[in-house]
């Protein structure tokens, strides 16, 4: 049954990620992946904050944390985009993207934990 909750959440997260990718943004900087990963970091921080302070079922945590967040965030896409920026000699954009992704997502987890209700 655990796999069902993870799979269902993963499908929902992947659909959310795809929906964000449809936003028409024309830039060399991978802003949509950055936004997606930041939102995923906020969400996982929020879920962990709720789980620590409220009585939340194991199934809900599997659905949200492992499923939705796992299906929604895009580390492999982030890695490919950073690689492509580096290989095309866009070193400044590459460094900025890596820094914003890592620092922004750590800040997102912190923010998510702070805003749970």
Image (cartoon, rainbow, N blue to C red):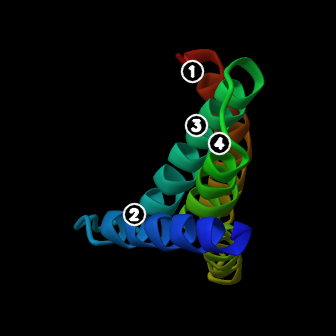
The secondary structure type at the circle numbered 3 is: helix
For mark 4, what is the residue? 44
The secondary structure type at the circle numbered 1 is: loop
- Label at residue 116: 1
Pick whichever, 93 or 83, lies toward us: 83
- Could one spot residue 26 in this view of the protein? yes
For mark 2, what is the residue? 16
Which residue appears at 56% of the width and 59% of the height? 68
Classed neighbour count for the residue bearing mark 2: other residues with Cα under 10 Å, few (<14), some (14–19), many (≥20): some
Q: Residue 55 placed where, x, y %?
A: 68, 26
Residue 19 quadrant: bottom left
The answer to the question of whether label 3 and label 4 lie on touching residues, with beta carbons closer than 8 A, is yes
When the figure is inspected, residue 82 is found, relative to residue 43, above or below; the finding is below
Which residue appears at 45% of the width and 57% of the height? 31
| Foreground tag (1 vs 3) | 1
Which residue appears at 72% of the width and 18% of the height? 53
- Label at residue 42: 3
């Amino acid at each position: 049954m655990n796999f069902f909750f993870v799979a269902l959440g993963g499908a929902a997260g992947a659909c959310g990620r795809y929906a964000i990718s449809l936003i028409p943004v024309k830039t060399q900087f991978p802003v949509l992946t950055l936004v997606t990963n930041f939102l995923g970091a906020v969400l996982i921080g929020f879920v962990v904050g709720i789980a620590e302070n409220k009585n939340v079922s194991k199934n809900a945590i599997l659905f949200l944390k492992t499923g939705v967040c796992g299906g929604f965030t895009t580390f492999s896409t982030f890695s490919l985009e950073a690689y492509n920026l580096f290989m095309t000699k866009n070193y400044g954009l590459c460094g900025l993207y890596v820094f914003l992704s890592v620092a922004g997502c750590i800040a997102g987890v912190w923010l998510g934990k702070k805003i749970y209700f």
